[in-house]
Image (cartoon, helix red, strand yellow):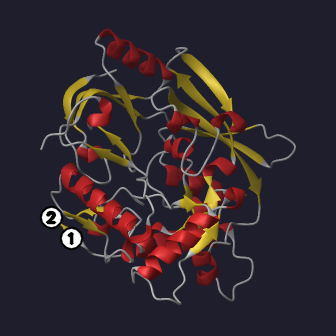
Amino acid sequence: MLIRENVSLAPFTTLGVGGPARFFAAASDENHIAEALSFARARSLPVFTLGGGSNLVVADAGFHGFVLKIEIPGIRPLSAPPDADARIAVGAGVEWDAFVQYCVSRNLAGVEALSGIPGTAGGAPVQNIGAYGQEAGETIAAVHAWDTRADKIVELTRAECAFAYRGSVFSAAAGRYIVLQTEFLLQKNGRPGAQYADLRKYFAGSVNPSLAEVRSAVLEIRKSKGMLLDPNDSDSRSAGSFFKNPVVSRDEFAALKQKARAAGVIAPDEAIPCFDAPEGNIKLAAAWLIEHSGFSKGYAHGRAGISKKHALALVNRGGASSSEIVSLMKLIQERVAASFGVALNPEPVFIGFETWGFKEKR
């Protein structure tokens, strides 16, 4: 395994910001991972595992540790249990959308609405990626990972993965597990996921769209929102949805409506978009909160900004620093909190910042 020094991380992220890694290497199998961890431990270095860099903000100072890029390949069918038509294993380094295309082309339902999400398959269980009414955790059967505590490969069942909204045991115990391979249970000729509002609108009047038609629709919708990677579209130079949709109790929802109306943020008869969430809670639309806190699509903050197509995406308008991205993030959080009393939590992973033990350059 080739270990390089002082490698710029910005080109390995979709946002395109951040400084260098002290050490950097790519791992295509578990032997490389063991070698990298041994190298890092001998030098008391923190280790960060990198996939497609689509959900990542790197500090301007970079990461004074070892960045291990996971490039484990392969998609292969396994023996399926009686309650499923197909069990498919995918290496952590496979491009996520290539895996979705593989499934859809074989009429395997369960991930079609997750088309176009950038990054690699290894990130799917970590963040429990979701879009348009589907989540990866719904069809994941097991995850094979390197347990850095036990220093061996372990297999975690769906229950052990503890999937939650944009999270899992892998994100909760950051740094413990390195995902190697994920197994999905999918339904052959299954009913496609087309219940989400955007998809219902797209297919208005259509009857039983196919998996391929749902995939095509999702790709088209994502592109219209700048959420599909395109080198010719500056709005796609982002980390995707930058904030999680906040979940509040019904009492908190009633209080924030009252607060917003009293402050004149919304009209007395204006509704706040919301969705039912588990345990009787309410999920709010982060993009709506942002726009109703005074930020318009296309808002500029130095060389950072908000996408012209989607208020939930923070973009690198060209030559932005991570400091500018974080400054805009904090500004949005402060205004949403002041307008609605709601905390917006960021979705990306941040490395090289003070939470990792050293400061970002100013």
- x, y (%) of residue 117? 48, 57
Q: Is residue 300 left or right of residue 134?
A: left
Name the residue at the top extreme.
Answer: 42
* Mark 1 residue type: Ala
**Position of 255 relative to 139 (above/below):** below
- x, y (%) of residue 247? 56, 59
Disc 2 secondary structure class: loop
Q: Residue at x 69, y 49 (%)?
A: 139
State if disc 1 and disc 2 touch (CB < 8 Å).
yes
> What whole-number distance in Å separates the C-alpha atoms at marks 2 and 1?
6 Å
Name the residue at the left extreme.
Answer: 362
Q: Residue at x 46, y 67 (%)?
A: 286
- x, y (%) of residue 332? 32, 64
Disc 1 secondary structure class: strand
The residue where tag 1 is placed is 300
Residue 58 vs residue 193, the one in the foreground: 58
Name the residue at the front extreme.
Answer: 262
Q: Is residue 138 left or right of residue 92?
A: right
The residue where tag 2 is placed is 302
Residue 112, quarter of the rendered image:
bottom right
